[in-house]
Amino acid sequence: MAGLRDFFARAKATEGPARVWTVIGGMAALAALPLAIVVAVWSADSPPSPAAADVENRTSSTTFTPQPLGSPAATPPIETSSVSPTQSASPEATTEFRVSLGELCNASDAEIYICGTEYEDTIQVGDQVFTHVGSGNVFATVKPPSWGLILKFPANTCTKLVIQFAVNSRGSGTARTRIIQTGSQPQVASTSYSAVGTLRADLNGTPFILQYNSTTGRAVFANGYAMCRTSSGQ
């Protein structure tokens, strides 16, 4: 202590008050340095506070656990179609109308000899009564290879034509009907004079002609219908 007093006395005498305070500050800093080192060492070695440890534990314990497929937290399943890759969905059904032969004959663009709903009548064919709405020219003799006209119909929406036909005769012979249309071979059906025959023809939408002939040239009477995508067939 005596040495410090001598030191300060000499500094005061030679340097003045300002120098004395500067020296005092330096000495104070030197005196505090060991204390700062001790505090730093203690801080490095001391365990963390309970609050800090709790935060660290919570952070380190939060881990990602993959969810199994099908659990509530799993990614929603991708919707798939029930149609297999090799199949295609069925197209929507197309509505078709049954259009009678009489209605087809009544169309404004149709060409006929005697045909239409107003011509409905009956004939005796063997032991069967046949109702018809159209026929060829009963005053003409139409024998093979010639063909007479029953109906000529313009472009249409029809896919099938079913025609029943017969001859009003007690004799023997064969009656025939046929359909002619663009892009297709003629479709023909025949029957004996004692039976009612049936012609089933596929239509492709182009104009068609319904024709007839018979062995003895007698007129053929007809009835039937078409399956069309419109109620008029046109």
Image (spheres, rainbow, N blue to C red):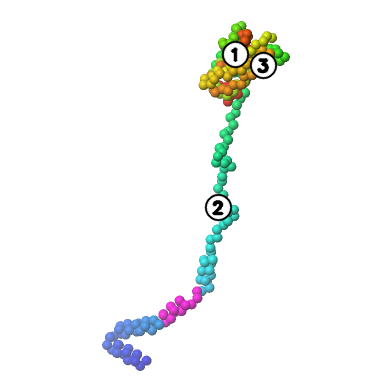
User: Residue at coordinates 62% horizontally, 16% vertically from top-left?
Assistant: 190
Q: Which numbered mark, 1 or 2, is in the foreground of this view?
A: 1
Decide whether residue 190 is among the magenta residues: no
User: Residue at coordinates 53% horizontally, 61% vertically from top-left?
Assistant: 64
**Please, what is the three-letter code of the amino acid marked with disc 3?**
Val
Identify residue for label 2.
Answer: 75
Mark 2 to mark 3: distance in Å? 70 Å
Mark 1 to mark 2: distance in Å? 72 Å
Marked residue nearer the N-terminal end (2 or 3) = 2
Image quadrant in which the N terminus is located = bottom left
Residue 182 point in image, percent of width and height: 52, 20
Q: Is residue 77 above or below residue 4?
A: above
Mark 1, other Cα within 10 Å: few <14 / some 14–19 / many ≥20 = many
- Quadrant in which residue 180 is drawn: top right
Q: Is residue 133 visible?
A: no
Q: Which residues are magenta?
A: 35-48
Identify residue for label 1.
Answer: 212
Identify residue for label 3.
Answer: 196
Principal secondary structure, stretch drawn in magenta: helix
